[in-house]
Image: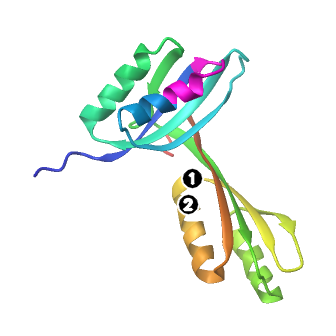
């Protein structure tokens, strides 16, 4: 069987900022059994318009169907395919590390400095780190901290992106 070209793809949507739009978009994905990897949404400079960033894993044919179906939705103003575009993308990540010794905290501060993260909360035996970087870098830091420190809690916000002004990639 030939490789179906399954790969990670990114879509940005401008949508009407009204009740039910998020559920309609996510319902399209679940109803058609499309894989929804990540979905973030927030208002734009225009309070009547929201922008969504969606990550999905699909083949070319399925991805074209997704874009067509999104374009048909009344609430969708514009669909932008980020897959082969120069984009600035970041994801927020919080990692809470429990049962830290003094030595662990020193190492976590070094990790934070290396990954350009911030220590945003600090307790007797725990630390809370904030990362704003690419999803790939966040994957790496989660793996590192989980292997090194064991008991952690992770919260990720999903990627947001905007077309790059210069020709730099994500």
Q: Position of residue 10 (x, y in %)?
A: 45, 38
Image: magenta residue range: 15-25
Q: Relative to residue 152, is residue 138 drawn left or right?
A: left
Residue at label 1?
A: 134
Q: Mark 1: few, some, or many residues within 10 Å (few <14, many ≥20)?
A: some
Q: Mark 2: few, some, or many residues within 10 Å (few <14, many ≥20)?
A: some
Q: Position of residue 149 (x, y in %)?
A: 66, 81
Q: Is residue 103 above or below residue 2?
A: below
Residue at label 2?
A: 137
Q: Relative to residue 19, is residue 79 drawn left or right?
A: left
Residue sitting at the far left:
1
Q: Measuring 40% from the left and 37% from the top, which residue is drawn there? A: 83
Is 57 one of the magenta-colored residues?
Answer: no
Residue sitting at the far front:
31
> Element at badge 1?
loop
Along the viewing direction, whichever of 51 and 75 lies nearer the viewer: 75
Q: Is residue 51 above or below residue 75?
A: below
């Amino acid at each position: 069987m030939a490789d179906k070209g399954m790969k990670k793809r990114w879509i940005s949507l401008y949508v009407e900022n009204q009740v039910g739009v998020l559920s309609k978009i996510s319902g399209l994905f679940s109803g058609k059994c499309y894989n929804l990897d990540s979905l973030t949404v927030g208002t734009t400079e225009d309070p009547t318009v929201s922008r969504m960033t969606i990550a999905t894993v699909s083949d070319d044919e399925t991805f074209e169907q997704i874009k067509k179906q999104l374009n048909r939705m009344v609430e969708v103003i514009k669909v932008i395919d980020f897959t082969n575009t120069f984009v600035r993308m970041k994801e927020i990540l919080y990692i809470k590390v429990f049962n830290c010794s003094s030595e662990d905290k020193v190492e976590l501060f070094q990790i934070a400095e290396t990954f350009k993260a911030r220590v945003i909360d600090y307790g007797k035996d725990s630390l809370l780190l904030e990362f704003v970087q690419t999803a790939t870098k966040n994957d790496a830091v989660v793996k590192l901290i989980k292997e090194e420190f064991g008991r952690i809690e992770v919260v990720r916000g999903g990627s947001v992106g905007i077309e790059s002004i210069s020709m730099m990639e994500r």
